Image (tube, helix red, strand yellow):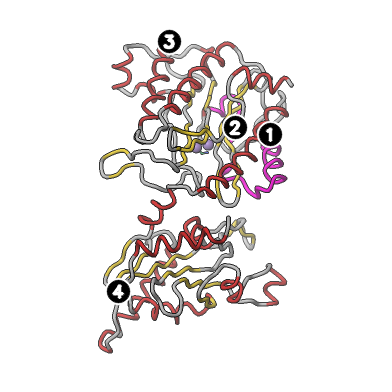
Amino acid sequence: MNINEFAKRRRRLMRMMGQDSIAVLPTASVRIRNRDVEYPYRPDSDFYYLTGFNEPEAVMVLAPGREHGEYILFCRENDPEQETWHGRRVGQEGACEIFEADDSFPISDIDDILPGLLEDRERVFYTIGCEPEFDQKVTGWINQLRKKSHAGVHTPAEFVALDHLLHDMRLYKSRSEVSAIRKAVKISIKAHKRAMQKCRPEMTEDQIEAELLYEFMRNGAKSPAYPPIVAAGENGCILHYTENSDVMKSKELLLIDAGAEYDSYAADITRTFPVNGKFTRAQKDVYEIVLAAQEAAIEKVQPGNHWNDPHEAAVRVITQGLIDLGLLKGRLSTLLKKHAYKKFYMHRTGHWLGMDVHDVGDYKVGDEWRILEPGMVMTVEPGIYIPAHTDKVARKWWDIGIRIEDDVLVTRDGNEVLTEALPRSVAEIEELMAG
Ligand code: GLY
Ligand code: MN
Ligand code: MN
């Protein structure tokens, strides 16, 4: 992401905050995996969205109109010994020169400096509840100011959650954000294709996971955007299956839900295909319903439609399809009213997509579903899941778990399926797997 993009975002946010305000935003903490081993570090998405800064132990402060600089970055000091052991730090100079902070202080000095920054402001934009230890610090700084009120020290009067403004900004993707998502998608498509081509009966799910991760990493995605789901047969009916450890059998379906993260943006793609490369009749029958539901849903991704339109379209097609297969009995309208599809389709048809795989942004405004607008990116991911021994379901349908998930950008005149290049139809999948 170009460094100017971060400056633009900060300026926009400050305009919305107003002059009397201050925003305080810490990045994510380092988390321990076991004993002295840490999880790979990933900055907080909100923090990264405004700074592009990826070191831990950092706090961004925005103080619109502040004479000595509006953008203040607290971060680790340079320390040759620490840097020899644990890696480079940009330090205060780098924070200003590379990351364009107007002012930067060592994170170890934050308790001395932050109360002074809060003092002459009326309104503090800070989101409580994300980093409990940091909440305590903020409370401490405010109390310090209150105690000095007799000496004429002023305490801000208002606390406002920062996410309201920020998450609404993040919902509308800029051109460079869409480019980053396109890149994540491109890498993910390579990985899904590779998985389809490498898949053979008697391999294990983790061997396919390894193929996905290999393709991610060699194309510049250091990490998946979320733990990949590689689920064969009955595992495909477990929505968040991530053990990925079973042997895959010839007549089973394999459901892969995997997306790369690139430049902090996520792809989120699911494909379901036969382990041996050829759909059985029953698998194909169910697959075609999910595919038709997805097509109907994508059709509804249009500016001016509301958030739930695609879901309603998918649910209608799935319900009718289940009636046609004899898996649901009754009239379409009655079954829709009773949400009968939930027996086989228990999740929603999509979510916002961006820096977080389940990205931020409200789905409703007041009591009304949000109206889709150009620049929004969402997934469309209907599915049908029929675990073995499902009540009143013939054996031929057992262990069929199918989801098809694509990433869709709302455009001025409709939509663009960013993941279009990945085979989706039965014929396309069988052809790729046979090749
Ligand atoms: N991969 C998570 C989801 O599809 O929502
Ligand atoms: Mn998804
Ligand atoms: Mn997914």
**In the image, residue 398 above or below residue 160:** above
- Alpha carbon distance from label 2 to label 4: 50 Å
Tag 2: amino acid: Ile
Quarter of the image with the C terminus is top right
Q: Indicate the quadrant where residue 426 lies.
A: top right
Tags 2 and 1 touching, CB below 8 Å: yes
**Nearest to viewer (mark 2 / mark 4):** 4
Of callouts 2 and 4, the N-terminal one: 4
Q: Bounds of the magenta span? A: 207-236
- Alpha carbon distance from label 3 to label 4: 63 Å
Does the Cβ of the disc 2 residue fall within 8 Å of ligand 3?
Answer: no
Q: Which mark is residue 256?
A: 2
Of callouts 3 and 2, the N-terminal one: 2
- Alpha carbon distance from label 2 to label 1: 9 Å
Q: Where's residue 391, x and y in %? A: 43, 17
Of callouts 1 and 3, the N-terminal one: 1
- Alpha carbon distance from label 3 to label 2: 27 Å
Q: Where's residue 399, x and y in %? A: 54, 21
Question: Disc 3 designates what residue?
Answer: 324
Of callouts 2 and 1, the N-terminal one: 1
Residue at disc 4, secondary structure = loop
